[in-house]
Image (cartoon, helix red, strand yellow):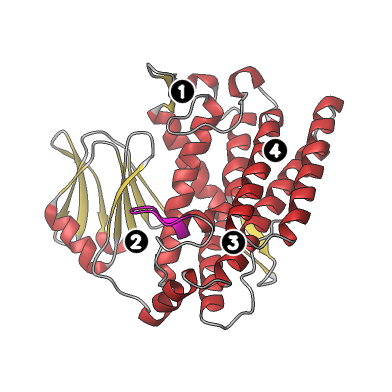
């Protein structure tokens, strides 16, 4: 268990979280292993078999402090929130917009454009950083494919067409992602994207990082006052955080994928940090998950240039900025939703 920024991550099996006056205490096998003033925490994330006392849950709900439950593999299970709050006029504008015939395609097109553009930046960077002629050829071909898909996106007006372009871009991008691995390619090679369950080490690592990123994007939507389940690119389904999924599309490659490659290439994550279950599912070991969480939190503190604000901001604030820009578009303060473009 560890505290990063103002979030407490509890990964210890059978840990028991309880409230003692104004202090959160974490007990393991009857011994208090950690205690922290509750007001220092903005959120609590529990992995696997972690128990939380009802009094602590009540207090977190009253304070508006989120408690998130993930399974041992980082898959989202539940999120405890207090009473609904925030800007009802903004949520009304969001609900009206999703039924509008014009706004959803406009928002979705910019989200997909941002995703493809950022993925292309990662591919071009990989081409610049390698001396392998074969890899350079694959990267160049992929970058050209993504450029062509960006061009076709400009003339698309239907959501299904945009989703098709996004799918084609993802297939082209993931076909070369394994070539960006510089050490132990045999272990971290991938044959496209697989999930639920991930079928190789790279997919297992990406799935875990995407879970962390999605949690941040859902939190960003809620912090702004948007409904995280009402999205514009992703179809609405019961229990699906469609807007959270929308917001994370622009950040997958530049935040999660780049971090996965860095962890592998620096050998902070190795082939021995995974295990395979009967049936073929490949999962991260407990200690490796801690390494990834720490690296992810550090990555969020790195500063990046935000093209709309025209200034450098911590990476971790980008989901919040994009959610706020979307809110401004929905309220009519902006003429378009500007995606985050990584440079």
The boundaries of the magenta stretch are 235-243
Q: Is residue 337 above or below residue 269?
A: below
Residue under circle 2?
42
Q: Answer with mark 1 or mark 4, whichever residue precedes in sequence.
A: 4
At numbered mark 3, what does the secondary structure look like: helix, strand or loop?
Answer: helix
Q: Residue at x 68, y 69 (%)?
A: 311
**Residue contact at pointers 2 and 3, CB within 8 angstroms:** no
Q: In this picture, is 20 found above or below 180?
A: below
Relative side of 162 to 124, left or right: left
| Residue 288 in sight from this viewpoint | yes
Q: Earlier in the sequence, mark 2 or mark 3?
A: 2
- Label drawn at residue 172: 4
- First of labels 2, 1 by sequence position: 2
What's the distance in space between the residues labelled 3 and 1, CA to CA?
36 Å
Label 2: state its secondary structure. loop
- Residue 239, magenta (yes or no): yes
Give the number of the mark in front: 3 or 1: 3
- The numbered disc on residue 274 is 1
Q: Is residue 217 visible?
A: no
Q: Quadrant of the N terminus?
A: top left
User: Circle 3: is it few (<14), some (14-19), or many (20+) Cα within 10 Å?
Assistant: many
């Amino acid at each position: 268990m560890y505290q990063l920024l103002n979030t407490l991550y509890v990964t210890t099996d059978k840990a028991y979280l309880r409230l003692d006056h104004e202090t959160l205490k974490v007990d393991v096998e009857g011994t208090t292993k950690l205690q922290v003033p509750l007001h220092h925490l903005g959120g609590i994330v529990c992995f696997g078999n972690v128990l939380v006392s009802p009094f602590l849950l009540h207090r977190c709900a009253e304070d508006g402090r989120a408690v998130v439950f993930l399974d041992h593999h980082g898959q989202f299970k539940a999120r405890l929130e207090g009473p609904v709050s925030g800007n009802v006029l903004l949520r009304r504008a969001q609900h009206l917009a999703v039924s509008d015939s014009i706004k959803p395609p406009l928002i979705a097109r910019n989200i997909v454009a941002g995703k493809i553009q950022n993925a292309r930046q990662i591919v071009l960077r990989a081409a610049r950083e390698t001396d392998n002629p074969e890899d350079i050829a694959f990267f160049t071909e992929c970058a050209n494919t993504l450029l062509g898909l960006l061009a076709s996106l400009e003339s698309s007006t239907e959501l299904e067409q945009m989703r098709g372009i996004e799918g084609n871009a993802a297939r082209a991008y993931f076909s070369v992602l394994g070539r960006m691995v510089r050490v132990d390619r045999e272990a971290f090679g991938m044959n496209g994207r697989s999930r639920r369950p991930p079928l190789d080490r790279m997919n297992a690592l990406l799935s875990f990082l995407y879970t962390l990123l999605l949690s941040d994007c859902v939190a960003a939507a809620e912090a702004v006052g948007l409904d995280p389940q009402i999205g514009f690119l992703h179809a609405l389904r019961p229990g699906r955080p469609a807007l959270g999924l929308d917001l994370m599309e622009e950040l997958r490659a530049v935040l999660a994928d780049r971090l996965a490659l860095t962890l592998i290439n620096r050998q902070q994550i190795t082939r021995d940090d995974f295990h395979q279950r009967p049936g073929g599912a490949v999962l991260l070991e407990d200690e490796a998950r801690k390494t990834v969480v720490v690296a992810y939190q550090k990555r969020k503190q790195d500063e990046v240039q935000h093209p709309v604000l025209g200034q450098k901001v911590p990476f971790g604030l980008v989901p919040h900025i994009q959610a706020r820009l979307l809110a401004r578009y929905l309220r009519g303060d902006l003429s378009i939703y500007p995606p985050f473009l990584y440079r």
